[in-house]
Amino acid sequence: MLTLNTKVDHAEKIDGELKLPYELREKSRLRAALTSGEEVAVFTVRGTVLRHGDLLRGDDGRVIKIIAAPEATYRVDCTTPLALLRCAFHLGNRHTQAQVGDEAGKGFLRIRKDPVLKDMLAGLGATVTEEEASFEPESGAYGGGHHHDDGHPHNPLAPIPLRQKIHRPGDKS
């Protein structure tokens, strides 16, 4: 079985693709299958999030490209930037991962499918549309860089304290 364990910035040749939903791209230990069907083991540094387009080198030198798989999401659209900002605020207040997007100069949010959040957003005046789409949420203030569709890395929103323990919902005490 191919073991993928080294993130690389570029490669002259891509030897395969690994299509994963966001939930699996957050895991540091994972058994999966390439689009070709070959089984792989992924071992990354704890806290690494694999983004669409990332490259991983395997123990045999092959390079595999990460593909963000479409998954069940809600797209959140508003009639004004202020209304969209209100929705983003309320999602952030609930520690909800959200993707910030722009299409034809109009901003939108994308979140994982959650009927309770859908009702809240509709109550704020948003149009919430169910869609199968790649989910690439913002990494947050302490999450490190994030590659947007423009391909340019973005730095964290705030300095990262050296000894900061960041609690995530799935962490054990």
Image (spheres, rainbow, N blue to C red):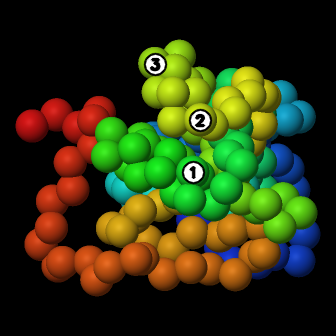
Closer-to-camera residue (63/46): 46
Q: Which mark is residue 32?
A: none
Q: Which mark is residue 83?
A: 1
Q: Are marks 3 and 1 in contact (CB under 8 Å)?
A: no
Query: Which mark is in front, 2 or 3?
Result: 2
Image point (70%, 81%), residue name: 152
- Residue 150 screen position, x and y as percent: 78, 75
Disc 3 or 1, which lies upstream in sequence? 1
Asked if residue 168 lies left or right of residue 78, the reply is left
Label for residue 125? 2
Amino acid type, label 1: Ala
Label pair 2/1, CB-CB below 8 angstroms: yes
- Quick one: which residue is furthest to the top in this view? 115
Q: Identify the residue at horizontal 41%, vertical 62% (top origin).
A: 140
Mark 3 residue crowding within 10 angstroms, few (<14) / some (14–19) / many (20+): few
Q: Nearer the viewer, residue 55 or 82?
A: 82
Q: Earlier in the sequence, mark 2 or mark 1?
A: 1
User: Residue placed at 74% from the left, 28% from the top?
Assistant: 129
Dot 2, crowdedness within 10 Å: few (<14), some or many (≥20)?
some
